Amino acid sequence: MREATTAEMVLREKLFACRDLKYKEFNSKLIPTVDPKTVIGIRTPELRKLSKEFAKTVEAAEFIKCLPHKYYEENNVHGFIIEAEKDYDAAVAKLEDFLPYIDNWATCDLISPKAFKKHLPQLLEKIKEWTKSDHIYTVRFGIGMLMRHYLDDEFKSEYLEIPAQVQSEEYYVNMMIAWYFATALGKQYDAALLYIENARLGKWTHNKAIQKAIESYRVTAEHKMYLRTLKIK
């Protein structure tokens, strides 16, 4: 392991000052792909606040170059710094430097750059690239961005093909595909239903999407009743 840089030491001092060992024990169970020894134990609201303050320091620009990070919370701080980037191209560049180092679903899912909202046509092309990656969490991130930004006013039925075409044996990829289609069934039922009726997804992902849709408040009781008949045994 390389020696910590000045920027990392500055941040770690702040992080360990906020440590909650009970929360560390609880949170470590939720992120099984992360070594518990690398989890400090900081609740997300507190970590967001700390990240916002740290992002204003001279050390922050140096810190995001220090990859890979040692601690889970350092990865999350990195993600929060990217979120706050106002320039679209800069946000994408920082994100693409960081995505290959993400090793868990929680860090992956917390990142939602503010700059993306005003550049949806460009973002869609990036999503298509990310979902073709060999890296689990790059694919998951791409599908997550598609779900976040393109299931409402920007929706087109052809966008459903993007996650439907992802072929993976990875749990965290397939869970995101299922989550995407469950959300699509709540927001764009008729278009998404075709993918369920035609069994376009793998068996596990198909059934998980139905399960999550049935659990959703967005899906009507009538639709839930019909979805139950489409489960693959």
Image (spheres, helix red, strand yellow):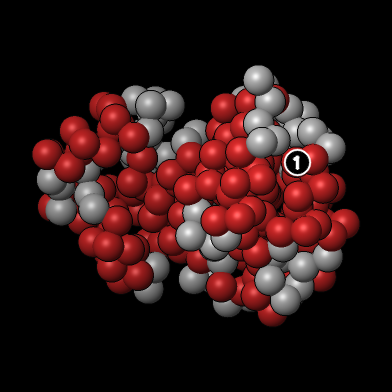
Residue 195 occupies which quadrant of the picture? top right
Residue at numbered disc 1: 196
> Given the image, on which type of amino acid does mark 1 rest?
Ile
- Image: 197 above or below 34: below
Estimate the x, y position of residue 4 in percent, counting from the top left.
34, 39
Who's the residue at 72% across and 62% down the image? 188
Estimate the x, y position of residue 151 in percent, counting from the top left.
69, 65
Who's the residue at 76% across and 50% down the image? 193
In-image side of 140 versus 123 (left or right): left
Who's the residue at 44% across and 61% down the image? 80
Q: Is residue 126 visible?
A: no
- Image: 120 above or below 199: below
Residue closest to the eye, 163 or 216: 216
Provide the secondary structure element on which disc 1 rests. Answer: helix
- Image: 148 above or below 88: above
Estimate the x, y position of residue 127 in percent, counting from the top left.
75, 54
Estimate the x, y position of residue 40 in percent, counting from the top left.
23, 40
Residue closest to the eye, 185 or 120: 185
Who's the residue at 82% across and 47% down the image? 194
- Image: 37 above or below 102: above
Residue 133 occupies which quadrant of the picture? top right
In-image side of 47 versus 190 (left or right): left
Residue closest to the eye, 37 or 166: 166
Query: Which image quarter holds the N terminus?
Result: top left
